[in-house]
Amino acid sequence: MVRDVAFGQYFPGKSIIHRLDPRAKIVMLIAYLVICFCTFNYVSLALTAAFTVFFILLSGIPVKFYFKSLKVIIFIVILTSLLNLFYGTGDPIWQWGILKITVNGINRAFFITIRIICLILSSSCLTFTTSPTELTDAIERLLRPLEKIHFPVHELAMMMSLALRFVPTLLEETDKIMQAQKARGADMDSGNFLKRVKALIPILIPLFVSAFRRAYDIAVAMECRCYRGGSGRTRMKSLHMGKTDVISLVVLALVVGGVILCNIFIPSVI
C-alpha cells in the first residue's frame, strides 16, 4: 500500500545521528554515495555496507521503516540487476541466443543491487533523522558561497525542503484517492497493462489538483506572513559543529581511505 512508504518522513529522536549537525550529515552522505559507487571488489563493498548498517543502528529508527523505504525502488533494483546480469563480459556460464550470463555479469548485478540499496538506506537515514527546517538551513549554509554569483541559494534550499516535506503528504493523499475510487467501483488490480494505466487517470487528476491547491495555499500563507526570502532572515536555531560531528567525519574519512586501499591492493571483480 502507498501508506506503507516511509521515504521522506522525519522521526524525532535523541540518537547520535539526530544530534549531528545537518551540514555534517549532508557532506557525509554525498561523500558516502560517491565512494559507494567506487567499490570494485567484495571487501570494499562489504566495508561500505557495514558502514551503512552501523549508521542505521545508531539512528535509533526501527529497521522496518528502512525496509519500507526500499519498497519504492524494489522494481528498479530488480530491473537494473537483470540488465547487468546479461551485460557482463567473459566466457558464458549460460547462453540462449544473444542472452548470456557470465561471472562478470553476476558480479555486476550483485554490486549494483547492493549499491542502490545502500544509496536508498543512507538517504533515508538522512531524512529520518533531520527535519525539513534543518535540511533547509544546512543546504543554504553549504551553498552560501554561490550567493556571490547571485545564485538563488535560499530559494533552492526552500524548494528542496518543501519537496521532501510533502512526499509523505502526497503519498497519503494518493492512498485516500485510491480507496475512494475503489469504493466507487473502480477496478485497478485486473486487466492488461494498458487497462491498468488507464485506471490511474482517475487517481492522477485529483492528485494533481490537490497538489496545486496545496502549493497555492502555501504561497498565500507565506505572503500573509510577509515572507521575503533569505535577505535579512534570522533563524530560531543556529547551526554549530561539535566534537561528535568531527568524529563522524573522521570515521567517514577512515572508511573512504579503507575503500581506496582495498581498490588499490585487491583485484577488481567487475
Image (spheres, rainbow, N blue to C red):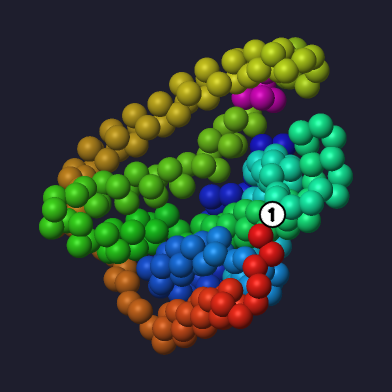
- Give residue 249's position: percent from left, percent from top: 45, 79
Q: Nearer the viewer, residue 125 or 216?
A: 125
Q: Residues within 10 Å of mark 1 (few under 14, many from 20)?
A: many
Residue 205 seen in the current view? yes
| Image quarter of the N terminus | top right
- The prevailing secondary structure element of the residues shown in magenta is helix
Bounds of the magenta segment: 177-181
Secondary structure of the residue carrying numbered label 1: helix
Q: Which residue is mark 1?
A: 108
Residue lying at 25% horizontally and 51% vertically, measured from the top left: 154
Quick check: 192 above or below 162?
A: above
Q: Report the number of discs.
A: 1
* Residue 180 forms part of the magenta stretch: yes
- Give residue 152's position: percent from left, percent from top: 21, 48
The amino acid on which the numbered mark 1 sits, given as a three-letter code, is: Arg
Q: Is residue 244 left or right of residue 46?
A: left
Q: Is residue 100 left or right of residue 155?
A: right
